Image (spheres, helix red, strand yellow):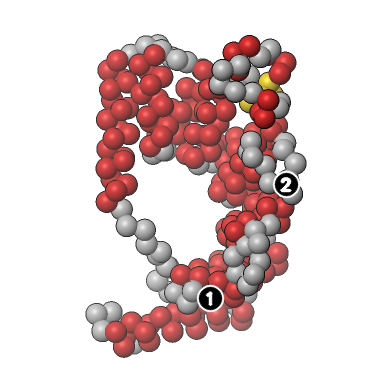
Amino acid sequence: MSFDLKKESDVKEYIEKLGIEYRFGCYSEKKPEVCHLLGDYLEGIKKDFEKAAKVYKSTCDDYGYAKSCYKFGNYSFLGKGKSGSKGDPRSAYNYYEKGCNLNDSESCLHSGLLLVSRSMPKQMDRDVPKGLEYLTKSCDMDNGTACFYLSGMHISGVHKNPESTTDIDIKSQKANDFIIQKDMKKAFDYAYKACELKNMYACANLSQMYARGDGTTKDESQADKYKKMAVQMQEELKKVQPTLQFQQGVKD
């Protein structure tokens, strides 16, 4: 049956049939990728976050589907999908870590950020070396945001006790006060990769690094090049309207 998606009645019928198709593929055929699509459908179309959360959780727990682990991690962190529920960073981290172990780059990014954050949730213990490991894994999987954060960590270094440091006294600190040493060459390399992966902020930093000769040879032409790239990305971002896309039907 064909649908005229310009007609409201046909759109409604198409959406309902899509939901039936996803439920069949998930519950009858037990396809984890379709269960994840069902979660997206419940979240984006039906706005039923409680059911979406249950689908993401079971798809992660029962099938080890990495993207669902990441999505349920987000729900846990925000306290989403359960009436009156507060965010649970520990539960979120557990699901992010599970997704990371299943090689989902976004899961690695978020588990890493939770571990290295200066303002750690009280439910979490700061573990910079482990967080660095997860962020590096995410960057190695071409996650530009992870590469950008790694660059930032190497620009200033990571102190063992960030609460006791300020921008004024940071220069007086000793090398053994840092978990990660300042390393502008590594910072440049990570910024370069992040910019190549279309991270706008990394391109802006890269421009500054070329302008100052930080971690690389000073080069005004390269500084100008990456500044223009960052500005162009910013302009493109303003034009983009966020949309949720769905797979058109279920492929075998």
Q: Which residue is mark 1?
A: 48
Q: Which residue is mark 2?
A: 122
Q: Is residue 94 visible?
A: no
Q: Residue at x 66, y 14 (%)?
A: 173
Instruction: Name the residue nearer the viewer: 29 or 137.
Output: 137
Q: Residue at x 47, y 15 (%)?
A: 215
230 relative to 235, above or below = above
Q: Splitting the image into 4 quarters, where does residue 174 fall?
A: top right
In percent of width and height, residue 126 lies at 72, 38
Disc on the earlier residue, 2 or 1? 1
Q: Is residue 114 left or right of residue 210?
A: right
User: Which mark is drawn over residue 78?
Assistant: none
Q: Residue at x 46, y 70 (%)?
A: 44
- Quadrant of the frame with the N terminus: bottom left
In percent of width and height, residue 41 lies at 48, 73
- Say which amino acid is labelled 2: Lys
